[in-house]
Amino acid sequence: MTLRIIATGGTFDKCYDPLTGNLIFSESVLPTAIARARITDPVSFEPLMAIDSLDMTDAHRAQILSACQRSPEQNIVIIHGTDTMRETAQVLGEAGLKKTIVLTGAMVPYRISSSDALFNLGFAVAVAQLSAPGVFVAMNGRAFAWDRVRKNKAAGIFENADQHSQ
Amino acid sequence: MTLRIIATGGTFDKCYDPLTGNLIFSESVLPTAIARARITDPVSFEPLMAIDSLDMTDAHRAQILSACQRSPEQNIVIIHGTDTMRETAQVLGEAGLKKTIVLTGAMVPYRISSSDALFNLGFAVAVAQLSAPGVFVAMNGRAFAWDRVRKNKAAGIFENADQHSQ
Amino acid sequence: MTLRIIATGGTFDKCYDPLTGNLIFSESVLPTAIARARITDPVSFEPLMAIDSLDMTDAHRAQILSACQRSPEQNIVIIHGTDTMRETAQVLGEAGLKKTIVLTGAMVPYRISSSDALFNLGFAVAVAQLSAPGVFVAMNGRAFAWDRVRKNKAAGIFENADQHSQ
Amino acid sequence: MTLRIIATGGTFDKCYDPLTGNLIFSESVLPTAIARARITDPVSFEPLMAIDSLDMTDAHRAQILSACQRSPEQNIVIIHGTDTMRETAQVLGEAGLKKTIVLTGAMVPYRISSSDALFNLGFAVAVAQLSAPGVFVAMNGRAFAWDRVRKNKAAGIFENADQHSQ
């Protein structure tokens, strides 16, 4: 099985800027993370954009959808900021592609010692392989269907969209 | 969904002994790794043994089987040395339990900077959730059925058992 | 020789807050860093405050001076934010204590993989042991006298105060 | 001030070999460690050899002495295995060069998360700058004269040679 990993930025890929003290986007960590994973099947890495998901517009989401459409691989993992992961998942989900697309990210940047990024990458790669075509959000050790998930920002976790609702 | 993670030792969990310069077993890293993963569903952690898988005997494998049998959780991840992961998978596979049991490990210890351990843990947790009952080996970004896998020691990777055989 | 290490916050000790995405102060990393250093002489650790050095007032500096005055140890390392390290060094320097006081910090937080923090700690501990009484800034692999140093914020380095001046 | 850093191998520079499970020498970590230290003065890095110090012979020590003799820099840090650091220090000490030579190493390899290597490098660089010509062993947050140090292998620390003796 072949896999495409598309990077869009988000907390997963942020690095520290010593001059300003801010977390910014520089070189992506994904090539390092993918090498570390020791995956034996071919992986195509596509660094599509590097932005905070709060800055993501409809145009950015159209670009992500287009990348998924033209992907020759049927199994796609998208590295994405957590704040609007659900919104991008919805755009992709409503498009109804015949591919398995898994969005993941991190609550703590890869380059910080306590990061969940590498765990989430491993989890998402498995979901991309084992699930039927569809769009999923893979966070907190769970795979959510794109239309049944929300981020609980106060708790910093993803949960079922119908939980605590209304 | 609830999950049980059983530690048996292996490269995943080895740490460096400054006095001898050897890699040994001391406190397990699994509680740290599990916390880092930010899993929201309940996880039961069971530190069953801490040995190199080359030192694993039939008695050890019987102990692992017994731990799987008495596990109240249906989804089990076993952290295991890679050298005899296949042999333990066979013992568990032939027992035919109605649980999803996934063996994983690492080629580089968790505590070393380039380790695949956290990726493998994430991958294995997803396989344990998404697969039908059965026994699987999850390494190198792939999930293998227990009776169709072997470790290629020269290359340091897991591959289909029927590859290059006869 | 005995040593006192006083923590005041700064980039060295910042950690990532998953809920807000900001770098904040939580539990100090200094006890971990000191253990890792395998120092055999006694070390007294004093967590005095945990603030960004841009937020440091005259009152905070008076508190740091007071901590140095009452320190039973003659050799003192102060972990401090880099932005106003020079200002605090001046307050301590003008007080003329008969102790060797070394201010250090980090350009990248300890918890981030490319951090200079542990190097700077080692450098500062040596300066504190080997220098005559006085106040020093130890950054970028150099020990500066308190009245001959400035931070070049554009370059993100410490340099001689008389360089490029007038 | 300019500095020369000479790598000879030792625990500091060991890396994990996934195929054999042994700690071996591969690419040196020193260029990475030096970049991380953010040293602003020029540093010449000389990868002289990469061996375990238990395998070090008189010929190796003659090679290290020769590297020190021809070094244009007056301040030299040597990264060395801890087991025979004292013996090499003696060879260099008896040669009586008019340079400040500091031997350091690590009890835990640089690439392992709890390593003392970067602290020791920072400590040694400061000793190399601040000490009069002579040969020193810098370990455990202390600088020892070459003829007054020994490794206590049972405790895994360096101590004064006259401690506990006769």
Image: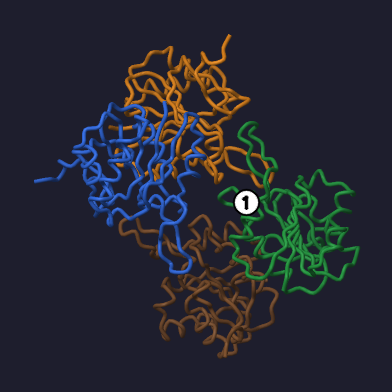
Chain colours: A orange, B blue, C green, D brown
Q: How many marks?
A: 1
Residue topped by disc 1: C110
Q: Is residue C36 above or below residue D134?
A: above
Identify the residue at image location x=48%, y=57%: D112
- Amino acid marked by disc 1: Tyr
Q: Quadrant of residue D69?
A: bottom right
Q: Is residue D17 above or below residue B3?
A: below
Residue D139 image offset from top left, x and y in percent: 59, 72
- Residue C17 appears anywhere in the view: yes
State the image quarter where residue C92 is shown.
bottom right
* Residue most extreme to the left: B166
Observer-nearest of A47 and B61: B61
Q: Residue at x 47, y 53 (%)?
A: B27
Closer to us: D135 or B42? B42
User: Which residue sits at x=64%, y=60%?
Assistant: C34
| Viewer-closest of D25 and A138 | A138
Q: Residues within 10 Å of mark 1 (few under 14, many from 20)?
A: many
Element carrying mark 1 = loop
Classify residue B4 as left or right of residue A29: left
Please indicate whether residue D61 sits to the left or right of residue B140 in the image. Answer: right
Q: Position of residue D113 (x, y in %)?
A: 51, 55
Give the letter of the chain under mark 1. Answer: C
Decide if residue D62 is on the left or right side of residue B140. right
Question: Which quadrant is the C terminus of chain C positioned in?
Answer: bottom right
Q: Is residue C134 above or below residue A164?
A: below
